[in-house]
Image: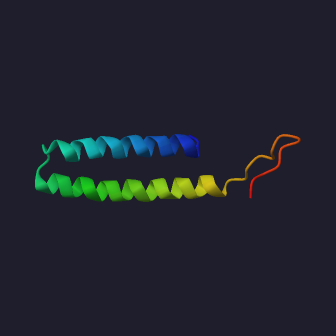
Amino acid sequence: MSSVERLDDLIARLERAAEQLRSGELSPDAAASMVEDCASLASQAATELEQLSRAELPAPPPGQDTLL
C-alpha cells in the first residue's frame, strides 16, 4: 500500500470516527476511547504526510522550471 493509499485510509477512518462522535450514540467512555483512537490516527496521518513531503519529487518535464 502506498503512502497516499495509507493516508486516504486514515482520513476515511477519521471521518467515520467523527460521524460516530457527532451522532451522540456513544457512551462517554466509548467517546473518550474514540477520541484517543483519533489522536493515534492523526499521528499516523502526520507521519504519512511527512513521508510524502520528503519523497523525492520527479524531475520537471523538459522545458519546465520548478517553482521556488
Query: In which quadrant is the C terminus drawn?
Result: bottom right
Residue 63: image quadrant is top right
Color style of the picture = rainbow
In the image: residue 36, left or right of residue 11: left
Please name the residue shown 13% across and 45% down the image.
Answer: 24
User: Which of the pair 65/60 is nearer the observer?
Assistant: 65
Please name the residue shown 54% across and 54% down the image.
Answer: 49
Residue 8 pos. (x, y %): 48, 41
In the image: residue 63, left or right of residue 6: right
Residue 3 pos. (x, y %): 57, 46
Residue at the farthest right position:
63
Residue 60 pos. (x, y %): 80, 45
> How many marks are shown on the rendered structure?
0
Query: In which quadrant is the N terminus drawn?
Result: top right
In the image: residue 1, left or right of residue 54: left
Please name the residue shown 28% across and 59% down the image.
Answer: 36
Residue 48 pos. (x, y %): 53, 53
